[in-house]
Amino acid sequence: MSSSFKLDILYEDKDLLVVCKPSKLLTVSTLKEKEQTLYYMVSSYVKKKHPKNKVFIVNRLDKDTSGIVVFAKSLRVKKLYQDNWSSYARVREYLAIVSGVVKKDKDVLKNYLREDNNFRVYVSKSGLLAITSYEVLKRIRGYTLLKVRIFSGKKNQIRVQLSNISHPIVGDKKYGDKKNPINRLGLHAFLLELRIGFEYKVIKAKIPKEFKRMFNSLED
């Protein structure tokens, strides 16, 4: 396992393990890559405590997106959270760096999304409804930092909907941005309000150093 990635644990109890995934790391294995994944790292961590320990992925992030990923320590807990994800994950917020200066301070984007044969998601007149809100945090010359909240969990919805308003996420070649001032995708899942037991806990991931470097004086 490469030492370039270190496990960043945000929360742990007997049922759950919540971690921050780095950008450029797969969540799960593919045919080409088996060990350089977040799942492999988390599985290795729990097996150090006991060889029979297992983990199960509750939610996923794209390889180039960083931020909060939830693992369950049993199939029962995984099913409980996945079957009730929209109510158990009550708030899901991201930081997004987009190309261009966004004029509206805040807005709600509602679009129907479809996927083509090349697995590219696009806005359509029918399909799955995606709802995303954003709020401008900072503007600098040619770029804007947004706080984004999703109210639906559709594939690539933030990337597609922001691209649809002519503000693609920096580094997102798939959805229309050619410039990459931070050498990574400018999308980070930084806040999750998660039901744990009978209460909701706010879990936050640190702001990536690339985001802080581009937008001075950012605080976690």
Image (cartoon, rainbow, N blue to C red):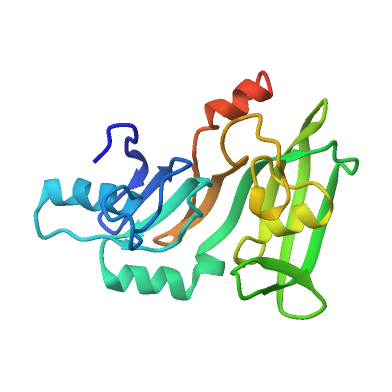
Q: Nearer the viewer, residue 103 or 75?
A: 103
Question: Vertical placement of 37 versus 154: above or below?
Answer: above
In the displayed structure, does residue 199 sit left or right of residue 175? Answer: left
Residue extending furthest toward the right: 103
- Which residue is rendered at x = 72% and y = 45% of the image? 177
Residue 72, x across and y down, in percent: 32, 61
Residue 91, x across and y down, in percent: 60, 55
Q: Nearer the viewer, residue 55 or 62?
A: 62
In the displayed structure, does residue 165 sit left or right of residue 80? Answer: right
- Which residue is rendered at x = 66% and y = 19% of the image? 217
Quadrant of the drawing holding the C terminus:
top right
Quadrant of the drawing holding the N terminus:
top left
Residue extending furthest toward the bottom: 126
Tally the marks: 0
Residue extending furthest toward the top: 217
Residue 192, x across and y down, in percent: 53, 50
Q: Residue 82 appears in which quarter of the rendering?
A: bottom left
- Which residue is rendered at x = 61% and y = 75% of the image? 117
In the displayed structure, does residue 56 sit left or right of residue 197? Answer: left
In the displayed structure, does residue 172 sit left or right of residue 112? Answer: left
Residue 150, x across and y down, in percent: 66, 58
- Which residue is rendered at x = 74% and y = 40% of the image? 98
Question: Vertical placement of 118 versus 5: above or below?
Answer: below
Residue extending furthest toward the left: 51
Q: Nearer the viewer, residue 148 or 77?
A: 148
